[in-house]
Amino acid sequence: MPYYVYRITESAAGFVKQLELLETFDNYREAKQFTKKTRSEMDSSIAAQIKVMFAENELSAEEQLQEKREKPITMEWEN
């Protein structure tokens, strides 16, 4: 299964994520290096994230990125 690298920008309300496929890789090491390089070259004023997704196909990767996840609960001793 390939690794997909996406640029993710969220709407002002945070309901809709704009996904842009940047690159596809066959191995994790190349995907990770590309992601680090892209993040370092990104303008800090742009509110976007760069993420790597491991999925069967592009549609599956985008579905995973669109999922709304709850923030993990931080216990008192973890602060």
Image (cartoon, rainbow, N blue to C red):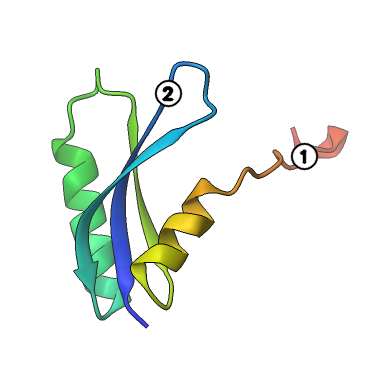
Closer to us: 66 or 6: 66
Q: Position of residue 35 (x, y in %)?
A: 25, 54
Say which label, 1 or 2, has the lower sequence index. Answer: 2
Q: Residue at x 51, y 47 (%)?
A: 66
Residue 31 image offset from top left, x and y in percent: 25, 66
Seen at 43% across and 36% down, the residue is 17
Q: Residue at x 25, y 80 (%)?
A: 26
Location of residue 15 in the rendering, given as x and y in whole percent from the top left corner: 54, 28
Q: Dot 2: within a 10 Å radius of its alpha carbon, few (fewer than 14), some, or many (20 or more) residues? A: few
Horizontally, residue 69 falls left or right of residue 11, namely right
Viewer-proximal residue among 38 and 75: 38
Is 78 in front, or is 13?
13
Quarter holding the N terminus is: bottom left
45 with respect to 11 (left or right): left
Q: Mark 1: which amino acid? A: Glu
Query: Label for residue 78?
Result: 1
Q: Residue at x 84, y 38 (%)?
A: 75
Q: Nearer the viewer, mark 1 or mark 2?
A: 2
Q: Dot 1: few (<14), some (14–19), or many (≥20) neighbours within 10 Å?
A: few
Q: Which disc, if any, is residue 50?
A: none
Residue 11's place in the image compared with 67, above or below, is above
Above or below, 54 against 12 in this view is below
Mark 2 lies on residue: 11
Give the spatial CA distance, label 1 vs label 2.
Answer: 31 Å
Amino acid beneath label 2: Ser
Q: Secondary structure at mark 2?
A: loop
